[in-house]
Image (spheres, rainbow, N blue to C red):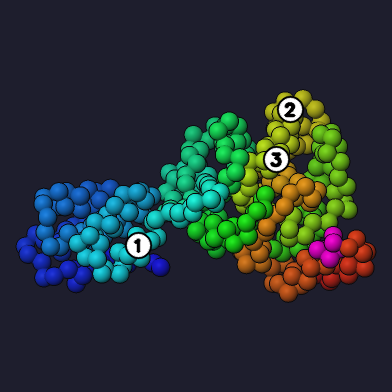
Amino acid sequence: MSLSRPSAHHAPPPAPHGVADLIATAQALQAAGDGPGAIHAYRQWLARGPSGQDWAAHFNLGVLLKDSGDLAGARQAFGAALAQKPDFAQAQAALAQVTPTQTPAGLPDIRLFSLAWSADTLTQTDPDIAILDNRANPRPDWREYWPMRHFLAQPTLDAHAYYGFLSPKFTRKTGLTGARVIQFMRDRPGADVYTFSPQADMGAFFLNVFEQGETFDPGFLATCQELLEHLGQPADLRALVMDSRHVVFSNFIVARPAFWQHWLSLCEKIFQLAEAGDSPLAAKVNAPTTYPGQVPRKVFIIERMASLLLAQGAWQCAPYSTFQCAWSALPTAQFRNEAIASDALKLAYNETQDKTFLDAYGELRSRIFS
């Protein structure tokens, strides 16, 4: 639910300089862009001593702390409001919003992180998604891979836990909160990997994620084919069929360390080759793309390694329905039923190896791209 800020009518008729004056002062500070000043005003007023109107001040303070990313402080403030006014429904709902989902005994931990690279992205208001601070961002040319590789290099990962590294755009692209991700995983226990991939049309209307990359970056597929052969990872990227159990964009993956370590070992070989920069292949991997900011090709190659590993069949994957997430901004997004049918045909081919399904898929998508 969306929290509304209480006004004077939430409290009994105020005494002079009471909570109504406080709220007006705090709102003026907020309007001037001074959120910290508004927080200080509430704390200073509450420090004067108890009053019958403290619940309103505590609640408003909690809203401000939540918006600033201080979820622990918000929990404390909402709890204080409820201690004085236990039937305050807004505070009950607000407290639930900032309270992390508890892990029942016997179930593995699910540790979700939001990759923050600026002050704006550092503010995380989802209690089930922690911040992985990458504001220093010493290698922006590697995008998400840089903080992920450093985190995964730690020797203290819990082998039974799940880890996910999500961009600040995760909820907007998937419609999912951290709590819903956790619930989805708990309803489908035992998988090695859980994926939450947006852009269903980009997955459905291309044979695989490498062909999709080629459409937007000519030369991408040939570079990836050469790279995989160089790394001893043979795969015919012109024939590889990926369905929605394999395709994952934006690195929206939650997985056990065993999968992440396998992924990291493959990606580190790409990293070392790109960093050395001493071969024609390295030049192709490091080539700029037309993506805004001329993001290097290596970023999009790394993004597709998880899909490659999933397509090779060694990992048990539970995908969240990509059709429930945000679609692309391209014209293909209007063909939703055709995207669902296309994915079903690819899945049927992967299960049976019956070329009839693949022929039907090719005919269907040719009508879309015509």
* Residue found 7% across the figure and 64% down from its top: 15
Question: Which of the numbered marks, if any, corresponds to residue 230?
Answer: none
Q: Which mark is residue 277?
A: 2
Residue 229 at what x, y percent from top left?
A: 86, 37
Mark in front: 3 vs 2: 3
Which quadrant does the C terminus fall into? bottom right
Residue 263 numbered tag: 3
Q: Residue furthest front?
A: 106
Residue at (88% x, 47% y) in the render? 236
Q: Earlier in the sequence, mark 2 or mark 1?
A: 1
Residue 94, label in figure: 1
Q: Which residues are magenta?
A: 346-351
Label 3 – label 1 distance at C-alpha: 38 Å
Residue type beneath disc 2: Gly
Tell me how far mark 2 sits from mark 1, CA to CA: 52 Å
Earlier residue among tags 3 and 1: 1
Q: Secondary structure at mark 1?
A: helix
Circle 2: element type: loop
